Amino acid sequence: MGIDIVKHHVKKGNRSAPKSEDPYLLLLVKLYRFLARRTDSKFNKVILRRLYQSKINRPPLSLSRIARQVSKSNKAYTPSHTVVTVSTVTDDVRLVNVPKVSIAALRFTRTARARIEAAGGEAITLDQLALRKPTGRDTLLLRGAKNAREAVRHFGMGPGKHAKPYVISKGKKEENARGRRKSRGFKV
């Protein structure tokens, strides 16, 4: 096989291991690497790839979003199902009634765990999930909203983009020239 001259020293962008040195995460990676190799399940490959991801690519998932997805799925979600997310599950004070669900996640906030257990559900870790459902059968795999970060609001400055400026106020002294007035180039 020849050498590709154009892409000679180009590395693949995909991660093959997590950057984090967290020993618990590394043990999870070891477990799901084994399951991805030894089972025909695509689920384990997806979980393994998500374990490699950076924190920005593992946005938190709120209890309200989980409740909405579970109710939306009609008969696809049954009491025998487990909701799976490779991220943090957070509480949402706006949610009045938490449904009885079994949730497997990397971590839970203290209040989220308390509310899940108070509703009769269970909050389990991903290694407990691997013991119960090694192929990912009867699971509902969810992700948080990646572009919900405040930083994303500032991206893409330009005419007609409506990007949020990096200023504390919109006063006379603040960023009020190019991009903020018609007479100075353009107005966003």
Image (cartoon, rainbow, N blue to C red):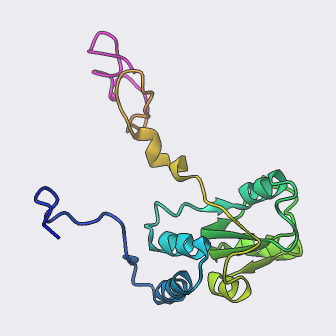
**Count of numbered badges drawn on the protein:** 0
Viewer-side residue, 19 vs 187? 19
Magenta span: chief secondary structure: loop
Furthest-top residue in this view: 183
Which quadrant of the rendered structure holds the N terminus?
bottom left
Q: Up-down: is 156 above or below 132?
A: above
User: Residue 77, image x and y in percent?
Assistant: 83, 63
Name the residue at 86% across, 56% down. 96
User: Residue 28, image x and y in percent?
Assistant: 53, 85
Which quadrant of the rendered structure holds the C terminus?
top left
User: Residue 118, image x and y in percent?
Assistant: 87, 74
Magenta region, residue range? 169-188
- The answer to whether residue 168 is left or right of residue 118 is left
Name the residue at 37% across, 35% down. 156
> Which quadrant would residue 54 be assigned to in this image?
bottom left
Viewer-side residue, 56 vs 127? 127
Name the residue at 37% across, 70% down. 15
Viewer-side residue, 71 vs 77? 77
- Residue 182 lies in magenta, yes or no? yes
User: Residue 91, image x and y in percent?
Assistant: 71, 63
> Which quadrant would residue 127 be assigned to in this image?
bottom right
- Residue 73 lies in magenta, yes or no? no
